[in-house]
Amino acid sequence: MAKQPMLKFVQIDRDMPQKRDASQRREDFDEIYAEYADAKAQEQSSRCSQCGVPYCQSHCPLHNNIPDWLRLTATGRLEEAYQVSQATNTFPEICGRICPQDRLCEGNCVIEQSGHGTVTIGSVEKYITDTAWEKGWVKPVKPAQERPESVGIIGAGPGGLAAADMLRRAGVQVTIYDRYDRAGGLLTYGIPGFKLEKDVVMRRNEQLELGGVEFVLNCDVDADIFATIQAEHDAVIIATGVYKSRDLAMPGSGAEGIEKAIDFLTASNRKSFGDAVEDFDSGRLNAEGKKVVVIGGGDTAMDCVRTSIRQGATSVKCLYRRDRANMPGSQREVNNAEEEGVVFEWLSAPKGFVDEAGKVTGVMVQKMRLGAPDATGRQSPEVIEGADYVEEADLVIKALGFEPEDLPTIFGQPELTVTSWGTIKAQFTTGETDMPNVYAVGDIVRGASLVVWAIRDGRDCAEAILKKFNTAAAVAAE
Ligand SMILES: Cc1cc2nc3c(=O)[nH]c(=O)nc-3n(C[C@H](O)[C@H](O)[C@H](O)COP(=O)(O)OP(=O)(O)OC[C@H]3O[C@@H](n4cnc5c(N)ncnc54)[C@H](O)[C@@H]3O)c2cc1C
Ligand code: SF4
C-alpha cells in the first residue's frame, strides 16, 4: 500500500520559517522571516488533514485551493503546486507574506481546533511562488489573441493590477494611470519592507509591463484627464484606494512634529528605494534620535512603530484607547513590535499636545477603562478622571485610519454615486458603478481593507468586463 503523504499533524509540530533575531532586524528594513528550505516546506505541507470541506479555503477571500497545493508541495510536485496556486491568486507570494492569516485561512484550520497548531498556509504559499520565480516558471502574459477592446484603470495598487493581469490574459488592451512614479499602490509606498520587500512588488510590475500592460505614471487623474480616459477606453476601472487621513482636532494639534502616518511611511519607503526625500532628509519625517509616540491600534500604527525603531528612534510608544485584546491590528504584528522594543500604552487616548515655541514636546494622555458594550457588542472606552499625564514626544505620528477622497468632485463626475462613507457605490461581484462602463474595485469600494480583497475585486471586475465584451462581440457578429 502506498505510504500516506499527508495528515502528519500528530507527528510533526507546526514550525514557521526562521524569524530573524529582533536585535538584528531592528537594524534594517529586510523581511523578518527566512524562506523555508525545500524539505521543511514539504514537511509542513504534509501536516494538512485534507478536509473534505476545507474551511481554510472558504475563509480565504480568493477561495484558494489550499489543500490541493499543500498536497502537491508535500509530494514534491512544486511546479503543479504553483500552477494551482496562481490559478486563483494573482500575487500569491505577496498574500503569503502579508495576509492576516490568523484571521483568514489559518484562523479556520481544523487541526488548530484539535490543538495541533495550524498548517503554515501563508508561508507555504510564499515558498511555492518564490520558488516559481527562482525557477523561471512565472512568465509574462502572452494572450493567444489580441482583442480590440481597451480598458483604462485608474490606480496601480493590487486591485488595479489584478484586474489588469486578468484582462491582458484575455488579450484586452490595458492602460493603468497612477499619480505615483512607481506602480504598486500601498504595496510600494505604504507597507514597509520588513513585511514586504520592494523587489517582490517591482518584479510583478515589470512582468505586467512585459505582458503588454501600459503604465502611465506621475498622472494625477483630475476631471479633464478622467474625461480623456473615458473617451479613449471601452471601460474604466477606478482603483484609487483611500488616502484621506483621519485627523485629531484637539488643543495643540497644529504643532510642528505631529505627522500623518501615510506621509511618514511613504517617505521611509522612498528612502528604501534610494530616492531623495526632502522632508526626510530635513529630519521632519525621520525618527532618528527622537522620542516617538504613535497614536492608533491598527496595522498602519504597527508599521509606523516598527519603522521608527529601524530609523533609530530613542524610544517608541504606541497609544491605544482600548486594550490589547480589543485592538484592530494583528496580534502577530504586536508581538513582533514588542520584541523589537516598542512599548504599548493600552487604554490611553490623546487629549491634546504640548509644545515649546510651536514644536511638539509631548502628548497629553487620558487613561481609559472599558465600559459597557455598545450596539455592536464592543466595549466602549471611558475616561478615568484625574489620571491624565504627559507622554514626552518630539515626533507624534497619527495612525487613525483613512477615508476616501471626494472622487465625484475630483473626477468631475457628479453622477458617480458614493455611499454615506464616501466610498464608491459598486456591485460587490462585478464592480459596476451607477455610471455606464465605469467600474470600481478595492479600498475605494470597501473602505480601508486588505490586499487579498483588492485582488479578489480586481479579478471579479475583470471577469465581469470580459463577459460584457464577449456579449457585445457576439451581438456584433450576428
Ligand atoms: C500602512 C499600511 C499597511 C498595510 N498593511 C497591510 C497588510 O499587512 N496586509 C494587508 O492585506 N493589507 C494591508 N494594508 C491594506 C492594503 O494595503 C490595502 O487594502 C490595499 O493596498 C488596497 O488596494 P487598492 O488597489 O484598492 O488601493 P491602493 O493600494 O491604495 O492603490 C491605489 C492607487 O491609486 C492611486 N491613485 C489614487 N488616486 C489617484 C488619482 N486621482 N489619479 C491617479 N492615481 C491615483 C494611488 O497612487 C495608488 O497607487 C495596509 C495599508 C496600509 C496603509
Ligand atoms: S491568499 Fe491570504 S487568506 Fe488566502 S490562502 Fe493565501 S494567505 Fe491565506
Image: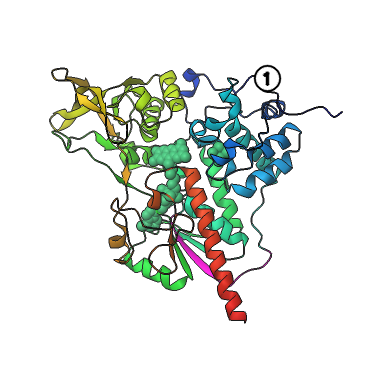
Taking the spot 27% from the left edge, 62% from the top edge, the residue there is 409
Given the current orientation, which residue lies at the most extreme bottom position?
478
Q: Decide if residue 57 is on the left or right side of residue 303.
A: right
User: In the depicted view, which residue is nearer to us: 393 or 90?
Assistant: 90
Q: Decide if residue 347 is on the left or right side of residue 301.
A: left
- Taking the image as drawn, is residue 191 in sight? no
User: Residue 253 magenta-drawn?
Assistant: no
Q: How is the image coloured?
A: rainbow
Look at the image and tell me in which quarter the C terminus lies: bottom right
Q: Which element is circle 1 on?
A: loop
Residue 33 screen position, x and y as percent: 55, 27
Q: Residues within 10 Å of mark 1 (few under 14, many from 20)?
A: few
Against 56, residue 455 (above or below) is below
The amino acid type found where label 1 is placed reads Ile
- Taking the image as drawn, is residue 103 in sight? yes
Residue 9 screen position, x and y as percent: 67, 23
Look at the image and tell me in which quarter the N terminus lies: top right
Residue 360 screen position, x and y as percent: 19, 29
User: In the depicted view, which residue is nearer to us: 156 or 361?
Assistant: 156
Label tally: 1
Quarter of image, res 78? top right
User: In the depicted view, which residue is nearer to us: 256 or 192?
Assistant: 192
Residue 278 screen position, x and y as percent: 32, 42
User: In the depicted view, which residue is nearer to us: 41 or 323?
Assistant: 323
Taking the spot 46% from the left edge, 53% from the top edge, the residue there is 156
Q: Which residue is mark 1?
A: 12
The magenta segment is 144-155
Mark 1 CB within 8 Å of ligand 2: no
Taking the spot 42% from the left edge, 68% from the top edge, the residue there is 229
